[in-house]
C-alpha cells in the first residue's frame, strides 16, 4: 500500500516548490509503504516511523524484511536521511543491495534496541553511509 492510498482525508497537495511528494505527510500513512533499492528489488516495507521527540525530527523508518505473512520478519532501523521518496512508483528507495540489507544490524520485533543510544545511532548511520543530524542528536 502507498501513501496516496492511505490519504483518506485528501490532505496531500502538490508542493509549490516542485519537490517530490507532498510537503507534509501523516506518519501513519507511511506505514506499509514499500521500500525498493535502485536495482528495483523489493527490500520490504515500513512498519514504524520513529520520531526524535527532543527536536521533532523523523529519526528512523523501521523496515520489515523477509519472512512470510509477518512471521520471521527481521526489522531494521534505517536513518530517515537514507531513504528517498519515489513519487513515480509511489514507494521509498534505499540505496543498498539486498545482500547488504540482509547483513545490516537488525533486530527482532520483540527485542528493539535503544535507538536513542549514541553508540548505536552512530553505528547505524555509518552502516548506511549517512550523516546523523548536525546537532549531534539522532
Image (cartoon, helix red, strand yellow):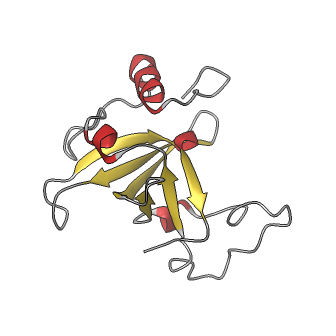
Q: How many numbered marks, from 0 up?
A: 0
**Percent from the top left, x then y, of residue 128?**
46, 33
View extreme (top): residue: 119
> How far across and how far down the image is residue 73, in percent?
20, 53
Res 52 visible? no
Compared with 1, 72 (above or below) is above
Camera-nearest residue between 138 and 101: 101
Q: Quadrant of the C terminus?
A: top right
- Which residue corresponds to the image point at 63% horizontal and 42% vertical from the top-left? 56
Above or below, 128 against 13 in this view is: above
Q: Residue at 59% across / 58% down in the picture?
A: 85
Q: Is residue 119 left or right of residue 30?
A: left
Left or right of 15? Residue 126 is left
Q: Which quadrant of the structure image shows residue 20?
A: bottom right
Identity of the residue drawn at 54% across and 71% down = 89
The extreme right residue here reads 16
Q: Which of the pair 66/50 is nearer the observer?
A: 66
Instruction: Work out which quarter of the rendered image holds the N terminus and state it.
Output: bottom left
Residue 83 in view: yes
In the rendered view, would you say 55 is above or below 121?
A: below
Res 33 quadrant in image: bottom left
Residue at horizontal 50%, vertical 29%? 129
Indicate the quadrant where residue 72 lies: bottom left
Residue 74: x and y in percent read 22, 47
Q: Residue 57, image x and y in percent?
A: 62, 41
Amino acid at each position: 500500500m502507498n501513501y496516496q492510498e492511505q490519504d483518506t482525508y485528501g490532505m496531500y497537495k502538490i508542493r509549490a516548490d516542485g519537490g517530490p511528494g507532498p510537503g507534509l505527510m501523516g506518519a501513519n500513512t507511511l506505514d506499509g509503504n514499500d521500500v525498493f533499492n535502485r536495482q528495483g528489488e523489493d527490500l520490504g516495507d515500513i512498519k514504524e516511523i520513529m520520531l526524535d521527540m527532543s527536536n521533532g525530527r523523523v529519526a528512523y523508518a523501521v523496515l520489515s524484511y523477509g519472512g512470510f505473512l509477518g512471521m520471521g520478519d527481521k526489522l531494521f532501523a534505517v536513518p530517515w536521511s537514507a531513504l528517498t521518496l519515489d513519487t513515480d512508483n509511489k514507494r521509498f528507495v534505499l540505496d543498498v543491495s539486498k545482500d547488504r540489507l540482509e547483513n545490516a544490524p537488525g533486530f527482532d520485533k520483540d527485542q528493539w534496541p535503544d535507538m536513542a543510544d549514541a553508540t548505536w545511532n552512530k553505528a547505524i548511520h555509518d552502516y548506511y553511509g549517512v550523516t546523523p543530524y548536525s546537532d549531534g542528536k539522532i
